[in-house]
Amino acid sequence: MFLKDNVPVYGKKREKKTRNRAQIRSRRAYSIILPFFAYIALWGLIPLIYGLYLGLTEYNGLAESPRFVGLKNYINFFTTGDYLLLLWRQVWIGVICLGANTLISFAIGLALNVTSRARGVFRASVYVPCIASTSITSAIFVALLEPNGTMNTLLKDFGAKPVTWSYSQFWMVFWVAVYFLWRNLGPAAIIWLGGLQSIDASLYEAAKVDGANAVQRIRYITLPGLRFVTSYIMLTGIISVMQMFDVIMFITKGNPYGKTDVLMYKIYRDGVVNFNLGMAGAESTILGLITVVFALIYFKVVLSKEE
């Protein structure tokens, strides 16, 4: 039996049935990812839009309703106070932490890729700093840095003079970096290790036959093979350091004399302590935009090198 266009009826039915199956599979796929997008909208998109709105208002979060002031908060950010100084401090402290974390975790990944016995132990213990409570681990660091704490006790035992850590910007930034590394080295090293194990071992064997030394093998085989892993670690690292808050709040509190104060800690004080939600919203928006710009610049540099 044929239709007017000489297409068999059973062919039309089969085509319709195939189309229905494809639609069912498509609906199932959307139903699977829908909760994820709902979660993103609830905890990401809605707060983002509300933060953008607050940045254009004056609002204390209590009795009065938000009062629209336009770009006043953004103008104040660039013209009054020490906001730009805090932003600059957030950037350079972040560069120190991110650079050290990237290099040291890469070295650990290389070592683990060679030493197979240590892999299991390291993988089992690497996430201990990640799952430990930030407040508890920060309290331990603070106790170590007390005038009569463990660090000064060790210095006395070795005949050195005790150090008043909280009075020195250098040492407080140093301990901020140490704490950041302690919490982030493990996951980054595991990611490096996974990338290293994905590189074909025959490439290294061929390079050895051609007389390439260890440095040359890393430069011409390892680093090009890890470009996507490097991009991921750098991107997540940029986001992490630009959101650095807990270590400042729990360990330094901006000391000494505000010399380790950063923009994220200022956002907390303006929004939670001083109830200046409008200014906090503007600061958050600016910091978020700067983070995006840094990420885009990094990817632009990476893509230009690949081309």
Image (tube, rainbow, N blue to C red):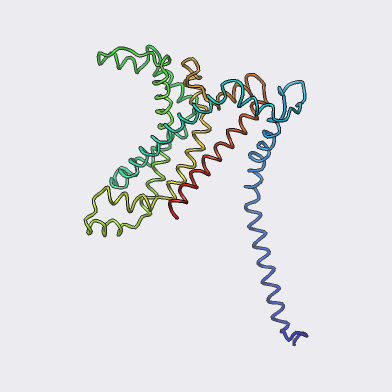
Q: Nearer the viewer, residue 165 or 144?
A: 165
Q: Nearer the viewer, residue 278 or 249?
A: 278
- Picture coordinates of residue 150, whole percent (x, y): 35, 17
Identify which residue is drawn at 49% across, 33% down: 241
Identify which residue is drawn at 59% across, 37% down: 289
- Is 141 situated above or below 123? above
Q: Is residue 242 left or right of residue 25?
A: left
The quarter of the image holding the C terminus is bottom left
Q: Quadrant of residue 190?
A: top left
- Picture coordinates of residue 107, whole percent (x, y): 33, 41
- Is 42 situated above or below 228? above
Q: Nearer the viewer, residue 178 or 86?
A: 86
- Is 170 situated above or below 97? above
Identify which residue is drawn at 35% across, 14% down: 163
Identify which residue is drawn at 51% across, 27% down: 246
The quarter of the image holding the N terminus is bottom right
- Picture coordinates of residue 221, whole percent (x, y): 33, 53
- How many numbered discs sit on the rendered protein? 0
